[in-house]
Amino acid sequence: MASVEKYQWKDGTKRYRVWYRDTANKLHQKAGFKRKRDADDFVARLSVSVNDGTYVDPRKSRQLIGDLGRKWMDLKAVGWKESYQRTIKISWRVYVEPKWGNREIGSVTHDEVQQWVNGLSTGDDSWDGKPKSLSVVKRAYGILKDICEMAVDDKIIVQTPTRKIDMPLAGVKRKAVVLTPEQLLNLVEHCGDRGPFILTLGLTGLRWGEAAALTVSDLDFKKHRVNVDKSATWVGSEVALGTPKHGKSRKVPMPSAVEEALRPLVKGKRPGDLVFVDRRGEYMRPQSTAKNNRSWFAKALRDAGLPMMRAHDLRHTAVSIAVSSGADVKVVQRMVGHSYATTTLDTYSDVFDSDLDDVSGNVDKVMNEALHRTKK
């Protein structure tokens, strides 16, 4: 399989060269060994890698990450939603390709990847010099990590340089704004003809895209249920209709307040017609409440005297109202469409924490009654 030969440079310096054939019987050479023992060690390691199936053709590791990245996206994009595809392509184009696109994958070191991750979080390695959020850093790193792992699986490199990379510490998590039932009704009133849409978000916990995609046939007024099996996502200026997050459909309770608000909206409509449309008859477009934004949702919040909040925070309001009405975590989990109850508890921990006071009060009541009985 391999042989070692001695050769000599023009200045008389002696070196050793290894000739070997790979698993496809192609001839290779590796020269420059100063000692025969080093060349023999290389042959021994080579024999082990061939026998255990870990041998990698060194020429393959010269492939550019840019080429491998485009191959990776073509393979993976089949199972991605359009909105996610767009997010990944932007991250690749802005953060990954400029740094790694022209690098041979076999030349990348662990230290370089760690420095890049650190640089993104501090702004030293970002295109605009501004520190990037943890989610942005994780997404960019995840792309490079997946490309390198694909290269390992395809025996392009022996091991990935992206293993054991430390992520930057997360910043302080933004606390969601939770409305009381009275505040929710006040907001609904200030939203005018868009009020039923906001009420639905605030009492059912639907995501914006899920509510925007509802059709008349999704409303079951007899069973008081809303069927959630699709979601509208804006990809640039276009709307892509896909499945809900995690790809799972669910049925959500429809409170009577929502039912009363929706009945007039669907009157005379066909089963496939949208329940909610904007003033141009199109899908309800997401609203921003960023500083100085003049969206109708931001205006309604100001007019109602409420703090600025994301429309997504209305899910927090829905959970809060459901929990205060007696719903347990499993019911809330199904309502908001989480795969696991632990996710629901982690996401809405502040809402469920308020129940601890009730638990404490109820335990005190039970123990006081028991103490009273024992004294009789």
Image: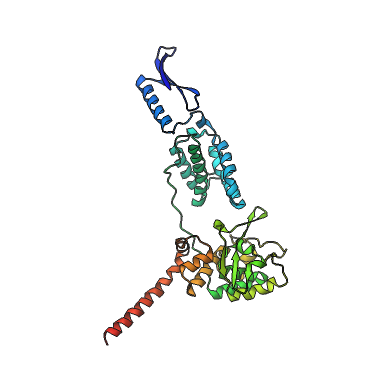
Tell me if I can see residue 35 in this picture. no
Residue 160 spot, x, y in % from top left: 45, 38
**Outermost bottom residue:** 376
Going 51% across and 65% down the picture, which residue do you hit? 334
Residue 17 location (% of width, % of height): 42, 19
259 left or right, relative to 145: right
Residue sitting nearer the eye, 284 or 289 = 284
The answer to whether 357 appears left or right of 180 in the picture is: left
The residue located at (35%, 76%) in the rendering is 363
Residue 359 locus on image (x, y percent): 39, 74
Horizontal side, residue 120 vs residue 47: left or right:
right
Number of marks drawn: 0
Q: Is residue 6 left or right of residue 138?
A: left
Point out the image quarter for the N terminus: top left
Query: Relative to 275, does residue 243 appear above or below in the rendering?
Result: above
Occupied quadrant, residue 314: bottom right
Q: Is residue 143 above or below residue 274?
A: above
How far across and how far down the image is residue 73, in percent? 58, 43
Q: How is the image coloured?
A: rainbow
Residue 201 or residue 126, whichever sits in front = 201
Question: Which residue: 53% across, 38% down?
Answer: 100
Q: Residue at x 45, y 53 (%)?
A: 170
Residue nearest the observer in this picture, 27 or 298: 27
Whether residue 26 is situated above or below residue 136 in the rendered picture: above
Q: Residue lying at the far left in this picture: please name it.
A: 375
Q: Is residue 336 visible?
A: yes
